Structures are given as structure tokens and as C-alpha cells.
Amino acid sequence: MIRFSLVVRAMSEAHDCTFEMQQIVIILLLLMLFVLGAVPGPVLFGFAMDHSCVLWEKQCDGSTGSCLFYDNHYMAWLLLAVCVACKVLVILCGLVAWRTYTGKQRKGTLPISTPTNDGSWSNRK
């Protein structure tokens, strides 16, 4: 649902572009959503789980295998720290986006939609 709303928002911003440019906007938006949304999560949680391991399995060739025993208390704190750090990052990005949006609105560069008498909407700056 969030991806759909972001694509709709991107398309409303790119309505003056050609169809090919709109396709490129959608592809870049979805690629950015995947790279920033789907990749870091498992990496960060895996990092937290690996650092909370107390006893690693030893392989016959001398390498380490999977974790045999975790420090549950330490892992809980690490996972909480990852979640809090991500939430702070989301809040900061939201504040930057809000500040950018209100800055454009104050300067008058943001188009304002107003209803007309016939029920349609017109954009004015």
C-alpha cells in the first residue's frame, strides 16, 4: 500500500513529463524503495544477532559455523537499538521532507490546487 501511494505521488509530480520519463521515474522510485527498504533490515538484524553470539560452532576445516548459544539479554538490547535507530532515521527524514515542503509553500513555488465553480480543480502558483 505504501509503495502504491508513493508511485501515485511520484506520478502526480511528474505529470508534465513524457510517458517514457514517467516510466523511468517509477522504476527509479521502486529501485530506491527496494534498496533503502528491503536490503538494510536483514543486514542490520543479522549484525545484531552475530554480535550477540556467545558460542560459535567449529567446523572440521577450522572455520566457524552457525551460532550455538546466544546471549538473549544482549541480543534484545541490540535489536532494540537497531529498531530505535531506524525509527529516529525515519523521523529525521520525515522532518526534512516536511521542512522542504513547507519551505516551498512559503516561497510560493508550490502549486496550490483550488476548486472552481464547475467542480474541477485548478492549479495556481
Image (cartoon, grey):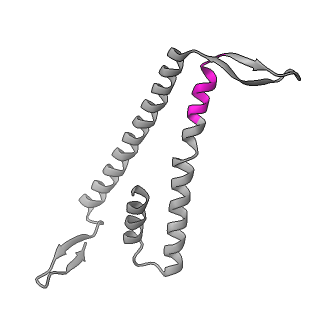
Instruction: Give the magenta range.
Output: 44-54
In this rendering, position of residue 97 left or right of residue 49: left
Q: In which quarter of the image is residue 59?
A: top right
- Residue ID at (36%, 51%): 97
**As drawn, which residue projects farthest toward the right?**
61
Looking at the image, residue 97 lies above or below residue 77: below
**As drawn, which residue projects farthest toward the left?**
117
Looking at the image, residue 6 lies above or below residue 68: below
Looking at the image, residue 120 lies above or below residue 83: below
In this rendering, position of residue 20 left or right of residue 88: right
Residue 56 x/y as whole percent: 72, 18
Residue 42 x/y as whole percent: 58, 38
Task: Tell me the quarter of the image containing the C terminus.
Answer: bottom left
* Residue 81 falls inside the magenta stretch: no
- Residue ID at (39%, 58%): 1
- Residue ID at (56%, 58%): 31
Residue 20 x/y as whole percent: 54, 79
Looking at the image, residue 66 lies above or below residue 24: above
- Residue ID at (37%, 65%): 9
In this rendering, position of residue 57 left or right of residue 115: right
* Residue 47 falls inside the magenta stretch: yes
**As drawn, which residue projects farthest toward the bottom?**
118
Q: In which quarter of the image is residue 65?
A: top right
Numbered disc total: 0
Q: Quadrant of residue 69?
A: top right
Main SS, magenta region, reads helix
